[in-house]
């Protein structure tokens, strides 16, 4: 999934709901600050590589926003932010097609995996339910064996616990897994779950320098992945 496209839309929806709750105009300096706190680079119209949105779980992102907004003098409770974020999730479900689009080459990659009897598992900072809905919207659900979201474990994705959980749940040997991701945290997740075969993709949130020093191969896009019967 194009992380920039998805998370930019989600952050903007969240900021609009926060401003509505604060009874402030939809377009003002606070909106820009909220979006920047959550990880939007307005100059590039992209998400920041370090997020926090798109990189860390929702509960972490809410805590970051809570602290920053308190310093700005906008007192909103954690529970209210969680309510607003959940409201944004519900609103986006009615127009999910506007929020998600696949990265180039992903569909053919999934088709090739199926042809070669390779099981595909999705691990995400979003919830399992939203992952499943996104896959159905893209009509990718038949290609994916299972999807695990951030609510499965308490730690951050990079800690590897979500990958360990999936491997245990599906009884998969980590030595027989290839971990593909577009962010250094994806690679750290694989490394911390004892996955030796990790691939960083440059069509997502990160560039080549982001993956330096990590145990991974780097490819430009999913079209660079080939399949053999060896």
Image (cartoon, rainbow, N blue to C red):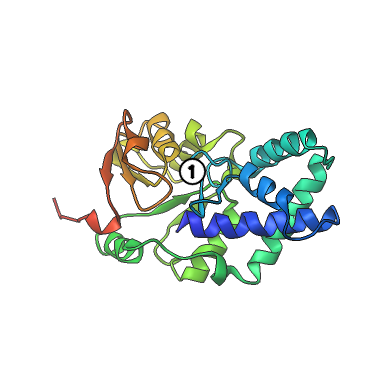
- The front one of 155 and 67 is 67
- In the rendered structure, the answer to whether residue 53 lies left or right of residue 25 reads left
The image shows residue 23, relative to residue 53, as above or below, that is: below
- In the rendered structure, the answer to whether residue 42 lies left or right of residue 191 reads right
Q: Tell me residue 135's x, y (percent).
A: 49, 64
Q: Name the residue carrying label 1.
A: 169
Q: Residue at 47% of width from left, 69% of height from top?
A: 138
- The front one of 172 and 54 is 54
Q: Residues within 10 Å of mark 1 (few under 14, many from 20)?
A: few
The answer to whether any part of residue 131 appears in the image is no
- The front one of 151 and 67 is 67
The answer to whether any part of residue 22 appears in the image is yes
On the rendered image, what quadrant is the N terminus found in?
Answer: bottom left
Q: How many marks?
A: 1
The image shows residue 27, relative to residue 77, as above or below, that is: below
Quarter location, residue 62: top right
Q: Residue at 34% of width from left, 63% of height from top?
A: 104
Quarter location, residue 58: top right
The image shows residue 145, relative to residue 206, as above or below, that is: below
Q: Tell me residue 141's x, y (percent).
A: 46, 65
Q: Residue at 79% of width from left, 35% of height from top?
A: 70
- In the rendered structure, the answer to whether residue 5 lies left or right of residue 177 reads right
- The front one of 124 and 2 is 2
Q: Tell me residue 132's x, y (percent).
A: 54, 61
Q: Secondary structure at mark 1?
A: helix
Q: Tell me residue 53's x, y (percent).
A: 58, 45
């Amino acid at each position: 999934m194009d992380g920039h496209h998805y998370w930019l839309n989600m952050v903007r929806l969240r900021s609009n709901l926060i401003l509505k709750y604060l009874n402030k105009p939809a377009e003002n300096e606070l909106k820009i600050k909220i979006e920047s706190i959550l990880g939007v680079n307005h100059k590039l119209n992209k998400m920041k590589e370090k997020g926090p949105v798109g990189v860390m779980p929702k509960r972490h992102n809410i805590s970051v926003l809570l602290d920053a907004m308190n310093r700005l003098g906008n007192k909103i409770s954690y529970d209210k932010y969680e309510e607003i974020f959940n409201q944004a999730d519900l609103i986006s479900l009615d127009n999910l097609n506007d929020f998600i689009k696949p990265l180039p080459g992903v569909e053919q990659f999934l088709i090739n995996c199926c042809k070669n009897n390779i099981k595909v598992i999705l691990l995400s900072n979003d919830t399992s339910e939203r992952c499943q809905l996104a896959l159905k919207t893209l009509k990718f659900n038949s290609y994916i064996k299972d999807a695990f979201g951030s609510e499965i474990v308490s730690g951050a994705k990079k800690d590897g616990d979500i990958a360990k959980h999936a491997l245990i749940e599906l009884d998969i040997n980590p030595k027989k897994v290839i971990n593909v991701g577009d962010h250094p945290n994806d690679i750290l997740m694989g490394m911390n779950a004892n996955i030796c075969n990790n691939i960083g993709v440059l069509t997502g949130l990160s560039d080549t320098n982001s993956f330096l020093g990590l145990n991974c191969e780097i490819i430009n896009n999913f079209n660079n992945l080939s399949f053999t019967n060896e």
